[in-house]
Image (tube, rainbow, N blue to C red):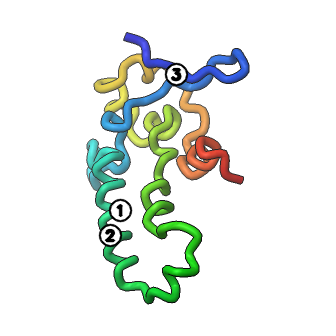
Amino acid sequence: MPLPSRHQDGKRSQPILPADACLAKTTVAGEPGTRVPEHLRSVGAVAERLTANLPQTVLAKAPFSPVIPALLHDVGKVSPGFQLHISRDYVRSVLPELAALSPGCTDHACTGATSLRVS
């Protein structure tokens, strides 16, 4: 079954990848490791603990919870380019319809910023 795609201005864009199928990390041996949702939950837990140690005067000046940027920091990892870059063999086994694509941008920071429309 083909992956759904987003359409903008009548143009076909990259496929929408299921986050729970996307890798955030590989092992030292290059094998599939942590998937994106698990990684972001871990990062969020660490951010919450660190935030709990900040003085209230610092937290009062923050425009939003410091946990939010921590949770969003790797949103670009849910992109075809990064997934093909991190482990093409894994992609072939889990998302075979993606394996035939050109990787395109493999920089997850750039992809994430573009996805969130941050400049």
Picture quadrant of residue 111: top right
Q: Is residue 12 left or right of residue 50?
A: right
Q: Say what amino acid the circle numbered 2 marks.
A: Val
Q: Residue sitting at 32 percent across and 34 percent down?
A: 21
Eye-nearest disc, 3 or 2: 2
Q: Nearer the viewer, residue 18 or 56?
A: 56
10 Å neighbourhood of mark 2: few (<14), some, or many (≥20)? some
Location of mark 2 (residue): 46
- Secondary element under disc 1, as helix, strand or loop, is helix
Location of mark 1 (residue): 43
Residue 15 location (% of width, % of height): 51, 24
Q: Residue sitting at 46 percent across and 44 percent down?
A: 77
Does 78 sit above or below residue 1?
Answer: below
Picture quadrant of residue 61: bottom right
Residue 58 location (% of width, % of height): 52, 85
Q: CA distance from mark 1 to mark 3?
A: 30 Å
Q: CA distance from mark 1 to mark 2?
A: 5 Å
Q: Is residue 44 left or right of residue 9?
A: left
Q: Residue sitting at 49 percent across and 80 percent down?
A: 59
Location of mark 3 (residue): 101
- Secondary element under disc 2, as helix, strand or loop, is helix
Q: Say what amino acid the circle numbered 3 marks.
A: Leu
Eye-nearest disc, 1 or 3: 1
Q: Is residue 105 left or right of residue 56?
A: right
Q: Say what amino acid the circle numbered 1 marks.
A: Val
Residue 65 location (% of width, % of height): 48, 68
> Number of numbered discs present?
3
